[in-house]
Amino acid sequence: MDAARAAVARLWPGLTAAVEELGGGITNRNFKVHVGDEVFVLRMGGAKTDLLGIDRAVEYAAGQRAFEVGVGPEVTAFVPEEGWLVARFIDGKPILLDEMRRPAALERVAGALRAFHDAAPIPGRFNPWEVVEDYRATAQANGVAIPVQFMSAQATANRIRQARGDQMLVPCHNDLLNANFLDDGSVRIVDWEYAGMGDRFFDLANFSVNHDFGLEDDRRLLRAYFGLERESDLASMRLMRFMSDFREAMWGVLQSGISELDFDFNGYADKHFARLEATAKQPEFERYLSLFG
């Protein structure tokens, strides 16, 4: 808390501010800051987050773009040398998992995702195949043993990449956990630290798997997003659910070797390896691959 108070004193010199820590962060510390009649969130980047592929300048640019298209909070300050990011506090409520499955919520969420995907380009690139390989190499460099599941998962990942081929790059969030959505009358998305130009189907799949969507939920999401239903879109999203879990699994592997936080990163990795293996064993998985020739 002392570091946060010192940061607040630099960001709002001479002003009286009240500071309270917000829970929920794993890689960063977040603080709610009251300054006069205004309320902000101060995000202080965690140690070694650059090893996770996080570029704070890209996060800042993505946050600005999200605000421009009405999806994210207004970003009011960025101190790159400290890794500090300040945004206006959103006085919104969470959108619960069950609510996310309802048609009205899906329409609103799909509209928010589409607005960002259709926005002007942002800096940075997010390629999940490169991300998992970078995480593997960095984990090994930090003395972490790579799980035996990696080689099989990598082989399946390469099949997905070969089947789908190159995809159009659009601005993507790439970390669509339920906690990153708020409703203040509009759907807002926060925490843009993994944002970059990428594959919209990774974002859609990441949202789907993080909200425990089933097949019919995915069909409804795609109809809300595209306005029609195509089997190739469904195949892309179901295949990219595998890539979402592969990224999460290797994130956990790397974090187990570099993070000082009291968190079960090995258990986190095991959970996602188990889920991606279950995904690859589903009868329709091979059919989805075959749809792309």
Image (cartoon, grey):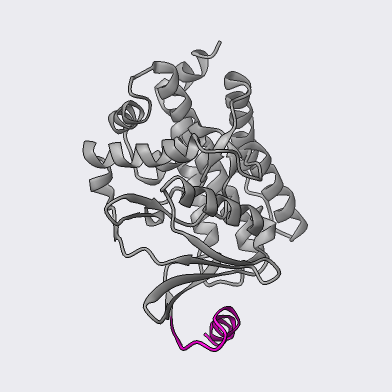
Residue 180 in sight: yes
Left or right: residue 259 compared with residue 110: right
Left or right: residue 180 compared with residue 12: left
Residue 102 in sight: no
Residue placed most toward the observer, 119 or 225: 119
Instruction: Check if residue 87 falls in the magenta segment.
Output: no
Q: Up-down: is 145 above or below 84?
A: above
Q: Up-down: is 237 above or below 197?
A: above
- The percent position of residue 21, horizontal first and vertical second, equals 44, 78
Please report the residue visible at 59 percent of the width from the left and 25 percent of the height from the top: 167
Please report the residue visible at 57 percent of the width from the left and 45 percent of the height from the top: 247
Q: Residue furthest top?
A: 293
Instruction: Check if residue 7 falls in the magenta segment.
Output: yes
Total numbered badges shown on the rendered structure: 0
| Residues drawn in magenta | 1-19
In which quadrant of the rendered view does residue 107 lie?
top left
Residue placed most toward the observer, 232 or 148: 232
- The percent position of residue 96, horizontal first and vertical second, equals 27, 53
In the picture, the quarter occupied by the C terminus is top right
- The percent position of residue 219, horizontal first and vertical second, equals 32, 27
